[in-house]
Image (cartoon, rainbow, N blue to C red):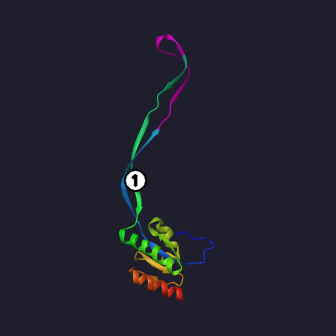
Amino acid sequence: MRRDSFSMKQQVKLYVKSARNVVGTVEEGAYTGAAIQSGTSVGRGGYRSPITVYPTYRKFEQKTAKEYVLPEEQEEVVELLEETAPKYGFEVVVIDLGRISRLGRAFRKEFRGLNVFPTLKASSGRTLTRFTKQDVETFLLSERAR
């Protein structure tokens, strides 16, 4: 969900960690261009050609295609929260730590101490790491009351 600057809803942050998985290979090709030689040259049949053009060719490279993929249990938690949180007046902000560099994670205070994924963190600082529907509803109700 997106955060609007005019949103009156409270936010809860869900920290997840995706992994980069190989999803296939991609063949990339590039034209190397035409080689052009200026000047006059004698061509077949004895005529003079002012420019000689050599044909272009393609270079092929095969690269592995990788994609960030959330584990299935984390994907289910994201769906559960996106369904449940708006009913209690909360906006869910999903932060994927798998897409943030190690250096970026090391210098951000909010990421320190996060070892279990997914983790739900409220603005009060309370966290939730067990995600049954009842646990999520109880957590959101207690946060709304604060």
- Residue that sits furthest to the front in the current view: 87
Q: Which quarter shows the C terminus? A: bottom right
Q: Where is residue 24 in the image (x, y as percent from the top left)?
A: 36, 52
> Which residue is at a point 51% across and 84% down the rendered structure image?
125
Seen from the viewer's position, the closer of residues 74 and 68 is: 74
Q: Residue 56: percent from the left, percent from the top?
A: 47, 31
The residue that appears at 53% across and 89% down in the rendered structure is 145
Q: Name the outermost residue toward the top.
A: 46
Badge 1 density bin: few <14, some 14–19, many ≥20, Cα 10 Å = few
Q: How many discs mark residues in the rendered view? A: 1
What residue is shown with label 1?
65
Identify which residue, 108 or 15, lies in the foreground: 15
Residue 42 % position (x, y):
51, 15
Q: In this view, does 128 lie to the left or right of 10?
A: left
33 within the magenta span = yes
* 96 over 21 or under it: above or below: below
Q: What stretch is highlighted in magenta?
A: 31-48
Residue at the image point whose x is 50% and y is 34% from the top: 33
122 is higher (above) or lower (below) than 102: below
Q: Where is residue 138 in the image (x, y as percent from the top left)?
A: 44, 86
Q: In this view, does 4 lie to the left or right of 70?
A: right
Name the amino acid type tagged 1.
Ala
